[in-house]
Amino acid sequence: MRIVFFIHFINAQPKTDTFLKNILENNKDTLFQKVLSNPNEYRLQIIYTEINRDKNNKPSFKNYYFNVDSLFYFNPASTVKLPLAILSLQKLHKLNIDGVNKYTSMQFDSAYPHQEKELFDSTSETGLPSIANFIKKAFLISDNDAYNRMYEFVGQKEINEDLHSKGYNDVRITRQFMGFTEDENRHTNPIDFLDKNGKVIYHQPMLYNTDSFDFSHEVKMGKGHWDSHDSLINEPIDFTKANNVSLHDYQQILQSVLFPQSVPANKRFNLTKEDYAFLKQYLSQFPSETNYPKYDTTEYYDSYVKFFFRDSTHKMPPHVRVFNKVGWAYGFLIDISYVADFKNNVEFMLAATVYVNSDEILNDDKYDYDSVGWPFLNKLGQTIYNYELHRTREYKPDFSDFKINYEHRNPNDTRPAIKDADN
C-alpha cells in the first residue's frame, strides 16, 4: 500500500492577536520595531503562551499569535532535531528488546550511495555512538551528525507517519543534513546495537520509504542562491521538497514533552518518566555543565542556543532555565522555548521565527544574524520576560518537575575541549 503524506494547514490567513501586538509595541527599541513593522519582509511569526496554575498546580495554556500562518514557510533548520530525539526514544520502547536502550552502543554501516559509516564517537564516555549521546549533542549545541543518525535510526517513513498520527499534520521531514538526493534520503543506513562485549543484539537493516509526499505547495525564495557546486544561480532557491514544520506544531510538540498531561492523549509520545526527565535535562543543561561531550565554553557558552537570552554577555541569569530547541539556516532563526524563572515564579512559552537575509542570496553564509536576527530574538525574549515579571498570578507555580540536578564539569578532566563541531 502506497501512502501519501499530506500537510494540513491550520491557518488560511496570518493570525495576529491584539493582546500580543500591544505587548510587543510597548518595546520602542528601533531595531525591534523595524522588524515588527515589516513582518512579511522578515517572515516573522511569534507564538506567546501564557501559563497559569490552579490551586493544585495544574497548568493551563493560552496561545497568543503574531503573524502566524502555516503557509508562510520558514526553513526549520535544526529545530527538527527535537521531534527526532523524541521519536528515537519512542522507537526504542517500540522495539522492546532486552539490552537495547538509549545508552546501548551503536554501529552505523553503509549500504547505499553516499551513506557514511559511523563506528566510533570520541565525544561519548564509551567512545561509541548511542541515542543518549546523540540527544545530548543535538540539544546542547545543535550537532548535525546527531540529527542525521537519529533520522537513520527512526527512518523517513516512521518519522512522518508517527507525527501525523499524533495530529502534528503540518510536519514534513524529508531530509538529512547531508546534501543527499530525494532518493538517497529515502534510504537509511543499516544499524547494529551492541552489548558490552561488542556482540550484536539487534540489527536494523537499511530502511526504504516507499510512501509519497504532497509537494503541491510551491515554496521558492530569494533572487539567487549558491548551489552544491559553489556556483551562483540567479534564480530563487526551491524549498518545495525541504523539511517543513509549522510554528504551531513545534509549540505543541514541546508542550507535549514538558507538560504531557496538558495535551490530548493522542498527541502524546510513548515515553517513560525517565525519558521525560532525560529530555528536560538536556533541553536545559548548559555546555559548561556537561562532561560528555566536553565543549569549549568560550565557543559554546551558556546562552549559545538560548536565543531569547543570548546577548553580548553570553551569560544566563542564575535563576532562569530555558527548555528549548533552536535552529539557524538560510537566514532563518528559530527558537521554541519554555522559560522558568525559579526566583520570581515566572513561566511562559515562546516560539518565534525570523528571516534575516537582506541581499536575498541564499546559501552564501552571508546573513544578518549578528546585526539583526539574534539581537531581535533577544529583545523579543526580554520583552515577554519583562511582561511576565510584572504579570499578576493568582497561584505561584510549583517548579518541582523542572528543578533538575544538573551535571558539574569535572575540573580535573584534562581532555581537550571541542571547539569546532558541525552544527
Image (cartoon, grey):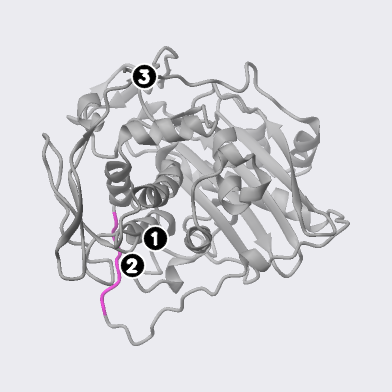
Residue annotated with mark 1: 136
Circles 1 and 2 in contact, beta carbons < 8 Å: yes
Say if the magenta span includes residue 420: yes
Residue 258 in the figure: left or right of residue 142? right
- Can residue 222 be seen here? The reply is yes
Q: Position of residue 40 (x, y in %)?
A: 58, 24
Which of the labelled discs sits on residue 293, or is there none? 2
Residue 367 in the figure: left or right of residue 186? right
Q: Secondary structure at mark 2?
A: loop
Q: Position of residue 26 (x, y in %)?
A: 79, 42
Residue annotated with mark 3: 3
Say which amino acid is labelled 2: Pro
Earlier in the chain: of badge 3 and badge 2, it is 3
Say which amino acid is labelled 3: Ile
Say if the magenta span includes residue 259: no
Say which amino acid is labelled 1: Lys
Q: Which residues, given as a range, are shown in magenta?
A: 415-421
Considering the whole magenta stretch, tell me its main secondary structure: loop
Residue nearest the observer in this picture, 171 or 210:
210
Q: Secondary structure at mark 1?
A: helix
Task: Tell me the quadrant of the picture where the N terminus can be found.
Answer: top left
User: Residue 422, relative to residue 183: is it above or below?
Assistant: below
The residue drawn where x is 71% and y is 38% is 63
Residue nearest the observer in this picture, 401 or 341:
401
Spatial CA span between label 3 and label 1: 33 Å
The residue drawn where x is 60% and y is 63% is 321
Earlier in the chain: of badge 3 and badge 1, it is 3
Residue 231, quarter of the rendered image: top left
Marks 3, 1: nearer the viewer = 3
User: Residue 326, relative to residue 20: is it above or below?
Assistant: below
Q: Secondary structure at mark 3?
A: loop
